[in-house]
Image: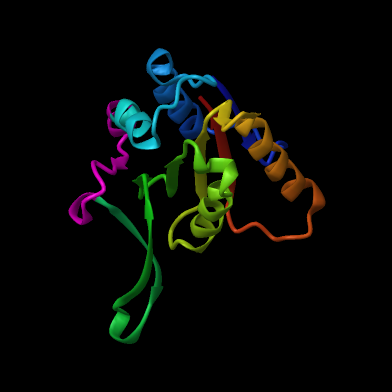
Amino acid sequence: MRWISFPKNIPPSENFRSIVKAFEDVENEIASSPRKKMESNKVLEAVRPGLESLGYIVEKSKRADDKIHVPVLFGENGVEEKYFEADAFHADKRTVIEVEAGRAVTNFQFLKDFFEACMMQDVDYLCIAVRNEYMNGATLSKDFEKVVTYFETLYLSDRIKIALKGILVIGY
């Protein structure tokens, strides 16, 4: 299990450390390798009890009733006009968790997760969990390292104002 939090000049919060512990508790079950291709839903299922014990609401399935909607825009009479879905959410901790597998880097899903978290109302923190390594055909991709490099560049370049107070990247 690998992890890093951003910005790097602020110590990781207790919230982030608790999320990491929930993943570490199931590390043997979810640890990625080039041959082990556990789907993100299965990883989320394994880590669900740990996250729920921390007070997170966790997506139970892909059925509409089990999805977690986080508001983005409100229209006339305050009616929710737009929302994004999250894998897990804690309203009091203002934290969204996204668990990715094969599409994390290949399809830049982690950037979509970042964008959506920046747009969500009442969200200040984002955790993105990705595989350490992913075998894409015959090519080995070091997903955790690639995602970390993107966020390091984002923070170091200082060219974009980041709406979030913190980002946690977990490599499983």
Residue 95 picture location, percent across and down: 44, 46
Give the camera-side residue of 110 and 34.
Answer: 34
Asked whether, in this view, residue 59 is left or right of residue 155, the answer is: left
> Which residue is found at the position 43% from the left and 59% from the top?
122
Residue 127 picture location, percent across and down: 50, 40
Asked whether, in this view, residue 125 is left or right of residue 83, the answer is: right
Image position of 121 with respect to 65: above or below: below
Furthest residue in direction right, as rendered: 157
> Which residue is found at the position 47% from the left and 39% from the top?
100
Image label count: 0
Furthest residue in direction top, as rendered: 28
Residue 150 picture location, percent across and down: 70, 44
- Residue 128: in magenta span: no
Image position of 154 with respect to 37: above or below: below
- Residue 65: in magenta span: yes
Furthest residue in direction bottom, as rendered: 76
Furthest residue in direction front, as rendered: 138
> Which residue is found at the position 61% from the left and 31% from the top?
144
> Which residue is found at the position 32% from the left and 87% from the top?
76
Residue 103 picture location, percent across and down: 51, 43
Give the colour scheme of this rendering: rainbow
Locate residue 152: give its quadrant. Answer: top right
Where does the magenta region start and end?
49-66
Give the camera-side residue of 3 and 107.
Answer: 107
